[in-house]
């Protein structure tokens, strides 16, 4: 039995005074991969922010690694964050400096001082994502997929136990999305990293099947993948058929309405 790394019991997830998700229960063990789905505004990002300690927990019991999130003192939050790699939809790279300096910045901010160790670690993480030759590039010279690979390399810097990915392929075309997903999946398998990934991407759910949690009507629940037939029928109801821009429209429909089944 792998150790539990995330454990939420009867937790309310709130944005300011508003309850976004109530009484949620879920846990993740080391190396587990869980998808988070749900329509726009259903609480996926809020749940992810609760796991990182950005949103405090006032009701229920939440534990991430060895940290109890209830009443977690702000001085401990950096220690928690060091063990969590986060990947966002919009990459969030610093635009004024090179790939190398983006990564060096994070290492220095998290206590790395030795120049040679910093260089060696940056080379390691860039090679994990196949970008060894882009170290001196500026982010705006890179494609969206390459920028996201830098963001994944950044998430790997401190050898995280958990990766939280908030729609990491949301800004990418289908081929690039599939490449990004294969990198995240492989890193998770190779290093036993626990991954919680919010996504609207049906192809990812289909090609890398794993457990799915859905945010809906203020609750978090287990669910299963909708069948392709169900979804196609839904699209037909929207007056669409397979063909031109199907993929794009499909993702939009998934995003707006979520897989309702
Ligand atoms: N900083 C904030 N302050 C107040 N309310 C917020 C804040 N961020 C989000 N909310 C509200 O919390 C609810 C959940 O938002 P959240 O961003 O978690 O949804 P989501 O499932 O990630 O949506 P999306 O698919 O658009 O990313 C929404 O009603 C949203 O308006
Ligand atoms: Mg979100």
Image (tube, helix red, strand yellow):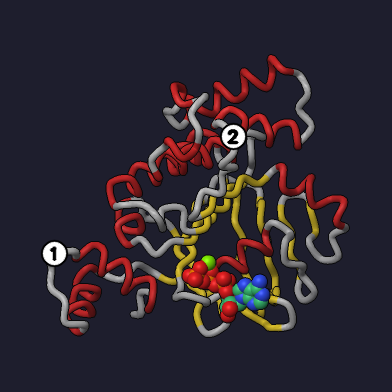
Looking at the picture, tell me which residue is in the foreground, 106 or 189: 106
Of circles 1 and 2, which is in front? 2
Image side of residue 241 versus residue 100, left or right: left
Q: Residue at x 21, y 77 (%)?
A: 235
Q: Position of residue 39 (x, y in %)?
A: 44, 75
Specify the quadrant of the image occupied by residue 10. Answer: bottom right
- Residue 21 in sight in this render: no
Q: Residue at x 79, y 52 (%)?
A: 77
Q: Position of residue 186 (x, y in %)?
A: 43, 38
**73 vs 239: above or below:** above
Q: Label 2: how many residues lie within 10 Å, few (<14), some (14-19) or many (20+)?
A: some
Tell which circle, 1 or 2, labels the residue nearer the N-terminal end. Answer: 2
Circle 2: element type: loop
Residue that mark 1 sits on: 244
Circle 1: element type: loop
**225 vs 6: above or below:** below
Q: Residue at x 68, y 64 (%)?
A: 50
Q: Position of residue 58 (x, y in %)?
A: 80, 74
Looking at the picture, tell me which residue is in the foreground, 89 or 210: 89
Looking at the picture, tell me which residue is in the foreground, 141 or 73: 141
Residue that mark 2 sits on: 97
Q: Distance between the Cα atoms at labels 1 and 2?
A: 39 Å
Is the C-beta of the residue carrying label 1 under 8 Å from the nearest atom of ligand 1? no
Q: What quarter of the picture does the C terminus occupy?
A: bottom left
Q: Residue at x 38, y 76 (%)?
A: 256
Is the C-beta of the residue carrying label 2 under 8 Å from the nearest atom of ligand 2? no
Specify the quadrant of the image occupied by residue 154. Answer: top right
Image side of residue 44 versus residue 17, left or right: left
- Residue 260 in sight in this render: yes
């Amino acid at each position: 039995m792998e150790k539990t790394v995330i454990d939420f019991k009867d937790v309310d997830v709130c944005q300011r005074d508003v309850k976004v998700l109530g009484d949620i229960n879920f846990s993740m063990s080391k190396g587990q991969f869980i998808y988070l789905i749900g329509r726009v505004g259903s609480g996926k990002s809020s749940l992810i922010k609760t796991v990182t300690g950005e949103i405090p927990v006032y009701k229920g019991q939440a534990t991430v690694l060895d940290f109890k999130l209830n009443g977690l003192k702000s001085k401990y939050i950096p220690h928690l964050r060091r063990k969590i790699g986060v990947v966002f939809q919009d990459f969030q790279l610093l635009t004024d400096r090179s790939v190398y300096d983006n990564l060096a910045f994070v290492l220095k901010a998290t206590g790395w001082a030795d120049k040679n160790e910093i260089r060696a670690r940056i080379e390691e993480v860039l090679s994990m994502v196949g970008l060894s030759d882009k170290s001196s590039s500026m982010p705006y010279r890179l494609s969206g997929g390459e920028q996201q690979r830098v963001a994944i390399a950044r998430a790997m810097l401190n050898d995280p136990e958990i990766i939280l990915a908030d729609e990491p392929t949301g800004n990418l075309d289908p081929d690039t999305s599939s490449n990004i997903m294969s990198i995240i999946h492989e890193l998770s398998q190779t290093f036993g990293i626990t991954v919680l990934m919010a996504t609207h991407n049906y192809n990812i759910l289909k090609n890398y099947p794993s457990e799915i949690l859905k945010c809906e009507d203020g609750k978090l629940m287990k669910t299963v993948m909708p069948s392709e037939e169900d979804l196609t029928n839904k699209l037909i109801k929207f007056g669409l058929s397979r063909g031109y821009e199907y993929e794009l429209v499909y993702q939009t429909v998934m995003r707006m309405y979520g897989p309702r089944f």
